[in-house]
Image (cartoon, rainbow, N blue to C red):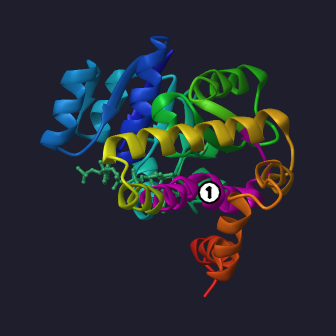
Amino acid sequence: MKVTIIGVGNMGSAIIKGLTHTQSFTLSAMNPVNPRVAKLAEKLDFKLVNTSSEVVNLSPDVVILTTPAPVTAAVAKDLAVLNDDTIFISAAAGITHETLAKALPNKIIANIIPNTPVEVNAGTIGLALPAEIPAEARLKVMTVLDSLGDVIEVPERQLDIIGVVGGCGPAFVDVMMDAMSDAAVKHGLDRQTAYEVIASMVKGTGTLAYDSKLAPSLLRDQVTSPAGTTIKGVEALEKYGFRYAIMDAVNKANGEK
Ligand SMILES: NC(=O)C1=CN([C@@H]2O[C@H](COP(=O)(O)OP(=O)(O)OC[C@H]3O[C@@H](n4cnc5c(N)ncnc54)[C@H](OP(=O)(O)O)[C@@H]3O)[C@@H](O)[C@H]2O)C=CC1
Ligand SMILES: O=C(O)[C@@H]1CCC=N1
């Protein structure tokens, strides 16, 4: 399958890297002239073009839009000349199916909210598909997205909040890991070992929660031994409003004033 990524920034690069690992797709990309992107194209060996008109010559089966949200509808409009069989997958947060459908009449459009772990094929991808999507097109979308991580199909109205917890979430976890690393270094661990331990801990904690399907509160209870060390740490988190800080990070990222 021929897949073209439009906009090779943080998300576009992560998707290209994830798809490269699978060795299952013929990859190409479009980005305005930029030495950073040219270097990536050389390294990962994908075809790079710099204008929308050149995308037509690539005749992609699937186009993934990872352009900045404010320009995505205009970029999509320039690509409306592509064959009507071309499937569009837009990752632009907050750009609705309705907006894209106006820019891309007669095209099949899927809206997604991925996250940066797609780079290592461990992404979380919220997906909203049009109700009337043909089975063959659905299969193409799922073939691409399944290769990048966990795909969670939802009604479009739920994509925004999935974009916050799934899409922005890695940044919130990164802040926590960074702070934890500082504390570990303070108590004598070298920086690289701190990063390794903490990243492994987050990976395992996520896997356990995902596989067991247990509530996070129950999993926390399994760690807090009576009169043990963890509950003292949990008490400190409560004292400093950690839970509310996380809730409000989600509120604010979701647009609450
Ligand atoms: N980062 C993330 O974790 C997530 C991002 N998204 C969505 O992905 C999209 C991109 O975000 P992100 O990767 O963070 O942003 P970046 O700024 O890192 O990347 C945007 C890329 O698009 C390129 N670009 C700008 N204008 C055009 C254009 N007209 N045609 C083609 N390419 C263009 C930029 O090129 P140049 O740098 O050369 O100007 C850049 O490479 C957004 O819509 C965002 O909502 C969704 C979920 C998660
Ligand atoms: O920060 C952003 O706007 C994008 C959307 C979700 C994650 N990154």
Residue drawn 63% across the image and 41% down it? 124
Q: Position of residue 25 (x, y in %)?
A: 46, 15
- Quarter of the figure with residue 250: bottom right
Whole-percent x, y for residue 189 in the image: 37, 48
* Residue situated furthest bottom in the rendering: 257
Q: What percent of the width, then of the height, locates residue 31?
A: 27, 42
Disc 1 within 8 angstroms of ligand 2 (CB): yes
Bounds of the magenta segment:
152-178
Structural crowding at the residue carrying mark 1, measured as other residues with C-alpha within 10 Å and reported as few (<14), some (14–19) or many (≥20):
many
Which element type, helix, strand or loop, lies under badge 1?
Answer: helix
Question: Count the marks: how many?
Answer: 1
- What residue is disc 1 on? 163
Which is the main secondary structure of the residues drawn in magenta?
helix
Residue 193 lies, with reference to residue 177, above or below; the image says: above
Between residue 104 and residue 163, name the one nearer to us: 163
Q: Between residue 55 and residue 47, name the one nearer to us.
A: 47
- Say which quarter of the image contains residue 239: bottom right
